[in-house]
Image: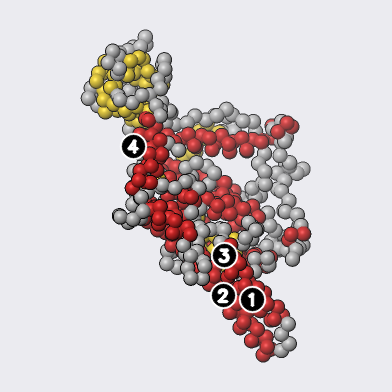
Amino acid sequence: MSLITDLARLEAVQSGRAQAVATVRHRHLSQRPLVLVPLITAGEAGAPLGALVGTERTSPRLLVVPQPRDRDLRFAFLAELAGVVLPYVDGFASEVETAERAETDPGTGKRVKVEVELCADAPQLIVPSRSGIEFVRLLGRSMRFRRTAEQDPEAPYPAPPHVPLLGRWLTHFGERARVPGSALLLAMTDLLSRHWATGQSTLEDQHLGALLAWIEAPDGTSGAEAALRAELSRDAAGQLVCPPAGPATDPAFDNQLLAPAIERYDKARAAVSAAEDAVEADIRMGELAAAERAVHALVESRTRPTWDAVWRGLDALCTLPEGPRATERWTRDRWSFTGHRDRVAAGEPPQPRRDDAVTAANKLATREREQARLDAQEALDDPLVMAGRRLTGEAFAGEVTESVPAYNEKNRPRPLITVRTDDAPHLGERTMVYRSLDGKPQAAEFVSYDEEGGVVLRVLDKMGRGKEPEPGSVPEKGDTVCFTLFEHEQRGGPKLPDPEETPWTHGGPPRTDEAGAPVPEAPDAMTSEDLL
């Protein structure tokens, strides 16, 4: 957390309203996101109770499991969810554009540019809170290894068609959510808290209703009081007016409303099975349908307020212009989506439970590199974020007071500029600094301080190939400049060995069959928990 954010939180406490900590939106928002508000039963994280899902604000699709302990009903829920999510994902898979990508030529070993397909856009899933992302990842793991009757006719409890495919896509979204700056799967609470600071803790910011209360507090009211009402206010029946932002439920709801409704459903279903004639069966079926409608109404009453809150959060975010470099990060998401689309189409096995050593190291290096890139890009896109970096000595801004032509021993231009600044950057001998020039980083090195405390820098590149710097490539006297001590583009790490060359100390090479093809993981073994 930066000092700017700390100051904004203090101001939010004083003013009673959330304070902006960004001037632009640092995440790409799709024109047609898929909002998912999940709900689970207490005590069992993998047992879904229901969900509201859809791309239209006014017409969400309600999915309910009337008895979460019934495997068949849970599979039916997952099949319905696949019927909503997979067509949405497939809608982005067919529209492509041609793009260039660097690949290694197997013959020469050199990097060459080749033309490949890139999806013109990508799907975007939005859940209410960070725990919703964990639920998506858990759902993906629980489904991607399931076998359908078509895949394995002897499977004791086959999954409905498309459920394993949904598991693979949810796993991909969950893994991509761990990459800093990715926007394929987003939590609304993280989005809002990235752009506004409230007067409450970061843990309290995970309550979507309380977070929005700070942001939407009208003039003359206190965000703290509004957030407290959102967290604690209950209606005449003792139920929370603003339910938790999923997937967890309130104990009072579980004990007072949900448990009796599920018990009535169980009794009605047992009565249908015990009916002795057609007339009695019709009566019992009516009772069963009424009991099921009651469970549906309860689930909708808990998810609909959160659904509306997510869309209000989207409205608030759309008031901010998108950061220039957010589009670049979304392009990397499109590459990721295109790559997974191709792997699924090629019939590759699902993602393994545990990554091999090389894949795990690559993922870790990618996340570290993307985090550093995200920090740099947000600062370059947003002067408010850059102000935080300047306060910590990682950047400085000021006016150029002198620009003197100079050359190195090879007669290449190396002009010296003096920057007068009130910042206190952490500069040492020959420290490298960078500024953005036409979207590209221009490097300079620290030379010394002049007699008046100005920073003397030697410009090193981005001045053209001639003996004289190109116009506009060197700051002139009177120009306002901003230099950073952090690099704008991150370099790749050391090359890792191929998976086939993994040493035995790190698990050895992956398993293959006699033909050399990788051996996919076996499906999850049946346990006593799978039987009712």
Label 1 crowd bin: few (<14), some (14–19), many (20+), radius 10 Å: some
Q: Nearer the viewer, residue 273 or 6?
A: 6
Residue 34 picture location, percent across and down: 48, 58
Instruction: Verify CB contact (< 8 Å) between mark 2 and mark 3.
Output: no
**Going from the N terminus, do you reach mark 2 or mark 1 first?**
1
The amino acid type of the residue labelled 4 equals: Pro
Q: Is residue 490 above or below residue 194?
A: above
Write down the quadrant of residue 146 in the picture: bottom right
Q: Nearer the viewer, residue 37 or 252?
A: 252
**Going from the N terminus, do you reach mark 4 or mark 3 first?**
3
The amino acid type of the residue labelled 3 equals: Ala
Instruction: Verify CB contact (< 8 Å) between mark 1 and mark 4.
Output: no
**Going from the N terminus, do you reach mark 3 or mark 1 first?**
3
Q: CA distance from mark 1 to mark 4?
A: 59 Å
Give the structural element (helix, strand or loop) at label 1.
Answer: helix
For label 2, the residue is 294
Q: Which one is closest to the eye, mark 4 or mark 3?
A: 3
Give the structural element (helix, strand or loop) at label 4.
Answer: helix
Colour style of the rendered protein structure = secondary structure
Left/right of residue 498 with respect to residue 466 in the rendered view? right
Q: Residue at x 33, y 52 (%)?
A: 319
For label 1, the residue is 264
For label 4, the residue is 383
